Amino acid sequence: MKVFIIDTINNIPGHKQFQDFSKYLVKKNVKVVHFSTNNVENFEGVEVVYWGMNFKIKSFFIFFHKFLKEKPDVVISTFRGNLFADFFSYFFKFRYYPFFRSDFYNQKWINKIKFRRVEKFIVLSKPMVPRIENMFPHLKNKIYVMFNSFDFNKISFIKKEDIILHVGGVSFNSEGKLIKGTDVLIQAFTNLKKENNFLSNYKLIVVGSGEGLKEVKNSTLSQDIIFTGKLSNLEVHKLMLKAKLFVLPSRNDAFPNVLLEAMQHSCCLIGTFGTGSQDVIEESDYGYLVEKENVEDLEIAIRKGVINYKSSDLCWQAHQNKINYYSRENWINEMYKIISN
């Protein structure tokens, strides 16, 4: 069996899982070609093909030459690579598994002719399904929900600090509203600060950059809200290690991998209904779901999270079912079953 994986190669968990799957397939004596938007060398028996990040004539011929030469049996592609893989599916015979990793949906006429030759159309969360069915009606019986994974490792916890952490791009959606709900969180945090000095010792740390950063900075004068801008993954994990609450009141989110990272660091998780958070968060003393754009609902969840947080170990135990479910091993095994069948 020959397998093409069209994604990219880096250490971000959502991409790293495909690299780990490539290595797993090689151990199963499968020929693997991994297409990457980053120019890196071959690794552990996996052939890497650099194709750049944008649709260019050169990229097109890189793909065409490789498809013509290798004639893959299976092609797995993620959002950026779907354009190439979908086009070639009409000219080469292979089993095609596209991942749709975005929470933005545009109803266009061209959708009627796209993804006509897929085996399974893989989406990242259950709330995505009705919207995908609306955008691609012909895929109704081929949609398959498969969550992202994380390579969890229990760590030696330090004492948590009175920190509420928020990580995400400060960018606008098609309606001109902040995708990650950063403005909603700032309003809820500010209201709680004013209420009988609740959260008096707490800091809100906002990590991320984007065109909306200036707007959210101007919306508050609080010394207890810290804007760090964009940070490295290592720096983010250091903050997660300290934070008691991780809050992501997104308006749009296919599957927030960052929640899995915060889960590993024993943060109480708060997310929104109707997004991928709904599949990740198990409601308990260490997990809450709130309605989108509902400041009052978010205040209640933050209050409960602060009051109920007892220790890192208890938080880790509360997340245990989800940690087992979203493990990298489970994801790889499921992927192998899909393409083997």
Image (cartoon, grey):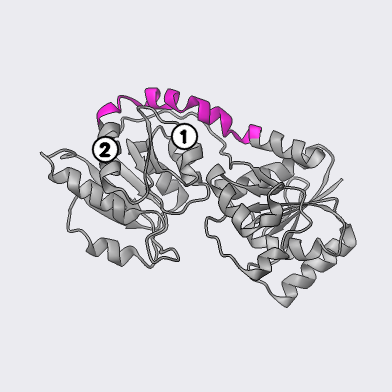
Q: Residue furthest bottom?
A: 57
Relative horizontal placement of residue 130, taking residue 261 as reference (left or right)? right
Q: Secondary structure at mark 1?
A: helix
Quarter of image, res 148 = top right
How far apart are labels 1 and 2 at the CA level? 24 Å
- Residue 214 is situated, as x and y percent measured from the top left of the image, at 30, 66
Amino acid marked by disc 1: Gln
Using residue 333 as the reference point, say whether residue 215 is left or right of it: left
Q: How far across and how far down the image is residue 114, in percent?
A: 71, 63
Q: Which residue is mark 1?
A: 264
Q: Position of residue 151 (x, y in %)?
A: 57, 36
Q: Is residue 310 above or below residue 294?
A: above
Q: From the image, give the main secondary structure of the stretch colored magenta.
A: helix
Residue type beneath disc 2: Ile
Q: Secondary structure at mark 2?
A: helix
Range of the magenta residues?
A: 307-330
The residue identified by callout 2 is: 300
Q: Is residue 312 one of those drawn in magenta? A: yes
Q: Which mark is residue 151?
A: none
* Between 274 and 222, the one nearer to me in the picture: 274
Label 1 or label 2, whichever lies nearer to me, is 2
Q: Is residue 93 above or below residue 262?
A: below
- Report the side of 148 relative to 29 (left or right): left
